[in-house]
């Protein structure tokens, strides 16, 4: 009885937990107050629910396992899909970046090649223009030099021709003068001889004429020729 009396203390609920449904049926708890009996009845009902729950625990575990497996599978599938999507996106981005880089590099290379070709063409054109200008300048200089040389040669030739002509004229004049002098001397001598042989009275005149002729030859060749012409005409008149 002392055990049941202790239920009146603070821990009476814990003592009630030790009583089972059979104890209540055996009227062991008849001495309990209504509150204690109600609490014990509720506790026994919870015990029945626990037993029922234990019977269905396996099914619950199976459901939990299935749910966990489904959740894990869903999570794995989602993770795999996300990874695949991320990988595909990364691959696409990398491919796009590579293609863009290749296109940019190709464009830069093409532009550089075009610029190099343009620069080479410009350099070639400039070189050709410079060569043409140099050739034109050389041709002009050569032409000027040739013209100058031709002019110099022409001037020299003209000078030489003039000198030759002058020398020839001088020589011819000297020869003519010498011939005239010789002819005059011969004529005078012949006339003197003829005058001496044919007409003695004309010897002094012939001698005087001879001196005049010689003096005239020394003074003026034209005068000599005039005198010779006069003597010739007078001799012709005398002959007639």
Image: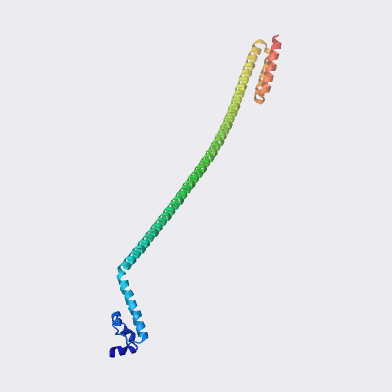
Instruction: Identify the residue at image location x=33%, y=79%.
Output: 44
Eyeballing the image, is 52 above or below 31?
A: above
Above or below, 214 against 133 in this view is above
User: Where 54 falls versus 111 (above or below)?
Assistant: below
Of residues 156 and 228, the one drawn nearer to the viewer in this rendering: 156
Residue 201 seen anywhere in this rendered image of the structure: no
Asked whether 219 or 140 is in front, the reply is 140
**Image quadrant where one finds the N terminus:** bottom left
**Picture quadrant of residue 235:** top right
Is residue 125 among what the camera can see?
A: yes
Q: Is residue 88 left or right of residue 139?
A: left
Q: In which quarter of the image is residue 144?
A: top right
Q: Whole-percent x and y of residue 69?
A: 34, 63
**Camera-side residue of 215 and 88:** 88
Image coordinates for residue 125, horizontal then vertical, percent: 51, 42
**Residue 210 percent across, percent down from the top left:** 66, 19
Q: How many labels does the image show?
A: 0
Position of residue 169 measured from the top left corner of the image (x, y, whole percent):
61, 25
């Amino acid at each position: 009885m002392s055990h049941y009396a202790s239920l009146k203390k603070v821990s009476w609920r814990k003592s009630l937990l030790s009583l089972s449904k059979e104890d209540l049926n055996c009227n062991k708890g008849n001495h309990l107050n209504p509150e204690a009996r109600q609490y014990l009845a509720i506790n026994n009902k919870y015990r029945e629910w626990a037993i029922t729950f234990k019977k269905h625990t396996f099914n619950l575990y199976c459901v939990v396992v299935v749910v966990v497996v489904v959740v894990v599978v869903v999570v794995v599938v989602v993770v795999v899909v996300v990874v695949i999507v991320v990988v595909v996106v990364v691959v696409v981005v990398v491919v796009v970046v590579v293609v863009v880089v290749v296109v940019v590099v190709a464009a830069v290379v093409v532009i550089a090649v075009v610029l190099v070709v343009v620069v080479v063409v410009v350099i070639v054109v400039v070189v050709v223009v410079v060569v043409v200008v140099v050739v034109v300048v050389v041709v002009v200089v050569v032409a000027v030099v040739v013209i100058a040389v031709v002019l110099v040669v022409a001037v020299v030739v003209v000078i030489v021709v003039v000198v030759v002509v002058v020398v020839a004229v001088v020589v011819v004049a000297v020869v003519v003068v010498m011939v005239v002098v010789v002819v005059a001397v011969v004529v005078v001598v012949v006339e003197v001889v003829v005058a001496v042989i044919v007409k003695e009275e004309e010897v002094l005149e012939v001698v005087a004429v001879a001196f005049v002729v010689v003096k005239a030859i020394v003074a003026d060749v034209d005068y000599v020729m005039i005198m010779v012409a006069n003597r010739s005409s007078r001799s012709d008149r005398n002959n007639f």
